[in-house]
Image (cartoon, coloured by chain):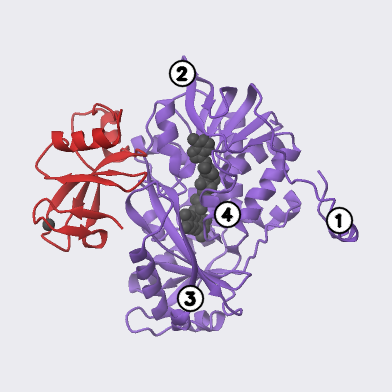
Amino acid sequence: MKRYSVFAVAREALRYHQGWGRAWKSPEPKKKYDAIIIGAGGHGLATAYYLGKNHGLKNVAILEKGWLGGGNTGRNTTIIRSNYLQDASAAIYEKARSLYETMSQDLNYNVMFSPRGVMMLAQTQHEIRGYKRTAQANALQGVSTEFISPEKVKSLVPIINIDGPRYPVLGALWQSRGGTARHDAVAWGYARACSDMGMDIIQQCEVTGIRHKNGQVQGVETSKGPIDCQKLGIVVAGHTGVLADMAGFRMPVEAVALQALVSEPIKPCMDVVVMANTVHGYMSQSDKGEMVIGGGADGFNNYTQRGSFHHVEETVRALIETFPIISRLKMLRWWGGIVDMTGDRSPILSKTPVGNIFINCGWGTGGFKAIPGSGWAMAELMAKGHSSLTEEFSLNRFKEGKFIDESVAAGVAH
Amino acid sequence: MLVFKCPYCGIEADETELSPGGEAHLKRFGPGSSDEELEGYLFNRENPKGVHFERWRHVYGCGKWFHAARCTATLEVFGTYSAQTFGPPKEIIDIIKSKRPGWKWRNLG
Ligand SMILES: Cc1cc2nc3c(=O)[nH]c(=O)nc-3n(C[C@H](O)[C@H](O)[C@H](O)COP(=O)(O)OP(=O)(O)OC[C@H]3O[C@@H](n4cnc5c(N)ncnc54)[C@H](O)[C@@H]3O)c2cc1C
Ligand SMILES: [Zn+2]
């Protein structure tokens, strides 16, 4: 792999940029791999990356039915934070956030991680209490957050209206080291690094069946023919139910649509991420100047990657009260992604009823921020059979009633 | 946007007039059932990419619960039917079969 650097840019500038190679190879699948990962979203690619980097397992294929990063990874609003309530969540999300800090250097790929700070507005008395509690929990977990006053909110976000008639801003939970990153770059950076380790990323290769014998995985059927493997990782977000069905077990996961939209680009006016969970809306400004806006998820099962007008209306209506400045902005693009929701709104990183099939799913509306931590933990689970980071996220927790109940803590959980 | 015909008041109702209630025809497990049955009942919802049976409530209309058969991959609605039943009626199954030849799900089809 040619390293990217300022010298490479200078060199290529001198030869009319003719020398940039492809960032990753596109090979045909081999007959057999040590491990196959289904799904080349951020979580699948990160899993493969850390299998190679941390555990020396490099005879790995990543199978993707569409194009890599074309699922939720390329459709999300890129909020990165780790201010969760429960210890198990704080551990894996904080691991992820800290890995984001060094990701560009580690991958030699600019993922544009921007630790601009994430603010979760408290707009009801209930939220004040909830966020103060989260700040205390975070202090114990070693996650740096604080509860800030409305005046501090206003000084960090001058365009905000803190005394709206219906939902005044009463304070906020502030994580100054949270932020955003370039979503595509995260997928591309991992893909390039995986390919460089000799792994095969096979796009346009849909898994259509999973073969197992005597309770052990043997391989997969794909649109490019059968491929054998010793270990299989299913990392397909919204399609978890479909893949679990192929393998013959059920998952406590439902697929629903979540949507987002961006406005026309405007001059820089807000340099932090603001989330307003009570009114179900959140917003940040991209480097291009677009206001990136997201809202709530649908309440019914859905595999179509589209949005619906009334959701946009709801979200924008709510945000306009808090950000009157956006009321005349034109909306530019609008899309949906299929997210995988679990009963307790926490992810599942687990062994499955079939030997050597592992599953990583349930990140729902908020898994972009978790990509490096999830990949790190999932790789350890697949390589060693256990990982301290995944223990509490196992599939058994539903049978045992040991939920990691973040839904109450997080409201809108991006 | 989804549009369902409420089987009670006969109105074509928009999604915004309705409230989704999740998987239809759940068999409830309580005391005396196995751990697996209780877990399945509580958490393992059907999640097909295709034909799905659901409960909906005409919340801003007559307020009643009803059932709907719908495709989760296209949002096509096959029909709605009364809440007072343990499974989809034959005419709904026939509509689904005519539109999705070869369709099968669990013990249906
Ligand atoms: C609108 C929206 C906004 C969001 N905002 C945020 C946010 O601000 N912050 C945050 O942290 N998270 C956010 N999320 C959630 C985040 O996007 C996801 O949790 C995360 O991207 C999931 O990554 P993944 O790798 O698990 O899934 P994906 O990126 O969806 O990757 C799964 C891949 O599996 C592939 N696949 C499926 N079936 C098969 C098959 N049979 N064979 C082969 N391949 C298959 C798919 O094509 C897909 O590429 C948002 C999501 C959406 C939709
Ligand atoms: Zn009605």
Mark 3 or mark 1, whichever is nearer to me: 3
For the residue pair A52 and A120, the one nearer the viewer reads as A52
Residue that numbered label 1 is attached to: A8
Question: Dot 4, crowdedness within 10 Å: few (<14), some or many (≥20)?
Answer: many
Chain seen in purple:
A
Q: Which of the marked residues, 4 or 3, is nearer the chain's N terminus?
A: 4
To which chain does the residue with label 3 belong?
A
**In terms of secondary structure, where does tag 3 sit?**
loop
Q: What residue sits right under mark 3 in the picture?
A: A330
For the residue marked with disc 1, what is the amino acid? Ala
Chain of the residue where label 1 is placed in the rendered structure: A
Question: Residue at position x 39%, y 65% from top?
Answer: A130
Residue A102 is situated, as x and y percent measured from the top left of the image, at: 71, 55
Say what secondary structure mark 4 lies in: helix
Q: Please tell me whether residue A140 is drawn above or below residue A293 in the rendered image.
A: above
Classify residue A309 as left or right of residue A64. left
What whole-number distance in Å separates the C-alpha atoms at marks 4 and 3?
A: 36 Å
